[in-house]
Image: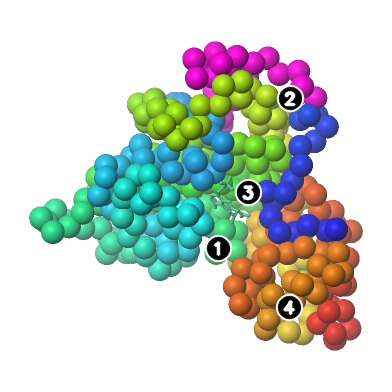
């Protein structure tokens, strides 16, 4: 089976498994797990923040961030199609008790204008606008990159309006690798950033939330409240440390995604917006996504139908260049024009 459903399907490497087996551990709730401590320190330095927290998942990282930045009843500006709004089970309402101010095309459109319009001045009728959440790369946008300059402007505006800015950077290293720049070029323009170890970087479990010391102190307490005090989590952090050494290999996923996109775009009945293929994702438009995906699966290829006429393919360490070539052949056979 060639699995292109997500980069979350990556399995730990042999090196990770060995590091996990040998990890020195302690009780992380007491702050005594040396491997977790090392991961948190390394991760904070990598993204240029004072402090970091190892969390169970990207969703937990985003939700702990929202809890730590806001008060109940506050409003959070976020793209309608952002992961936080679309795929986190309504958790901002469930845990932080905040209202999401959903903005269409916040991320791909004129972000600055859209934040200005969504922001609410003090008024007895209005909630307090407290936080803006950006996402980079933008999953539902096709794995697109928000340029660092745009992030800089958004961060400046957030400061001017006295708002906090959280970055859902689940795949921020994909953005950095694609731009051939230091990840700090992006992360310096946010108050907090979450990134995932368990996607393209290949760790089995875990994400990082980073920010200033005060913020992480608060976040640590909220993580505990959410049941995320993971005790001998060094077993997992050991894999995370190895994952951080494999950032450069994301370039391979990007070139495989490009190859896949170009191949699929030649097939009648499949539409691909090549401009949006900037990292490790390929979104395509087909007439009947469910039927197309079912046919692919019969032929040994897994992809995700994410709307009635949209299919997402994600490249990862589990998918080779030869696999991609095979997928193009299979897709073109299914589409029946070659
Ligand atoms: N994304 C998953 C699914 O939930 C859609 C995927 O397969 O892409 N932020 C972004 C931008 C994400 O894409 C994801 C996961 C998360 C946060 C949440 O991470 P986890 O799955 O670790 O909770």
Point out the frontmost of discs 2 and 1.
Answer: 2
Q: Identify residue for label 2.
A: 20
Dot 2 or dot 3: first in sequence order is 2
Q: Identify residue for label 4.
A: 291
Mark 2 vs mark 3, CA separation in Å? 25 Å
Q: Is residue 152 visible?
A: no
Dot 2 or dot 4: first in sequence order is 2
The residue segment tinted magenta is 18-47
Q: What residue lies at 76% left-to-right and 37% top-to-bottom?
A: 12
Mark 2 touching mark 4, by CB under 8 A?
A: no
Q: Is the distance from the Cβ of mark 3 to the nearest ligand 1 atom less than 8 Å?
A: no
Q: Is the distance from the Cβ of mark 1 to the nearest ligand 1 atom less than 8 Å?
A: no
**SS under mark 2:** helix
The image quadrant of residue 259 is bottom right
Question: Chief secondary structure of the magenta span?
Answer: helix
Q: Is residue 269 above or below residue 148?
A: below
Confirm whether the magenta stretch covers residue 107. no
Q: Identify residue for label 1.
A: 140
- Looking at the picture, how far across and down is residue 105, in whole percent? 43, 67
Image quadrant holding the N terminus, namely bottom right
- Looking at the picture, how far across and down is residue 242, in whole percent? 71, 30
């Amino acid at each position: 089976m060639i699995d292109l459903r997500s980069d979350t399907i990556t399995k730990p490497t042999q090196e990770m498994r060995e590091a996990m087996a040998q990890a020195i551990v302690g009780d992380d709730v007491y702050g005594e797990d040396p491997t977790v401590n090392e991961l948190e320190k390394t991760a904070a330095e990598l993204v240029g923040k004072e402090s970091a927290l190892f969390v169970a998942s990207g969703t937990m990282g985003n939700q702990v961030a929202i809890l730590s930045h806001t008060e109940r009843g506050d409003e959070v500006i976020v793209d309608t199609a952002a992961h936080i709004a679309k795929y986190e089970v309504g958790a901002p309402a469930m845990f932080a008790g905040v209202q999401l101010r959903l903005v269409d095309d916040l991320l791909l459109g004129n972000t600055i204008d859209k934040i200005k319009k969504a922001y609410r001045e003090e008024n007895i009728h209005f909630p307090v606008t407290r936080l803006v959440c950006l996402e980079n790369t933008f999953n539902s946008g096709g794995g697109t990159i928000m340029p660092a300059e745009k992030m800089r402007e958004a961060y400046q505006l957030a400061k001017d309006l006295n708002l906090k800015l959280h970055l859902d950077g689940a795949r921020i290293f994909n953005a950095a690798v694609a731009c051939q720049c230091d990840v700090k070029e992006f992360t310096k323009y946010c108050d907090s950033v979450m990134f995932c170890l368990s996607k393209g970087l290949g760790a089995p479990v875990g994400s990082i939330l980073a920010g200033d010391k005060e913020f992480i102190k608060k976040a640590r307490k909220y993580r505990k409240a959410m049941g995320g005090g993971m005790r001998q989590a060094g077993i997992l952090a050991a894999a995370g440390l190895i994952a951080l050494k494999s950032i450069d290999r994301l370039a391979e996923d990007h070139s495989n995604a490009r190859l896949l996109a170009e191949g699929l775009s030649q097939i009648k009945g499949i539409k691909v917006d090549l401009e949006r293929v900037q990292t490790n994702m390929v979104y395509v438009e087909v007439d009947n996504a469910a039927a197309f995906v079912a046919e692919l699966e019969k032929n040994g290829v897994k992809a995700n139908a994410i709307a009635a006429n949209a299919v997402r393919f994600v490249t990862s360490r589990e998918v080779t260049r030869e696999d991609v070539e095979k997928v193009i052949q299979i897709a073109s056979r299914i589409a029946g024009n070659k």
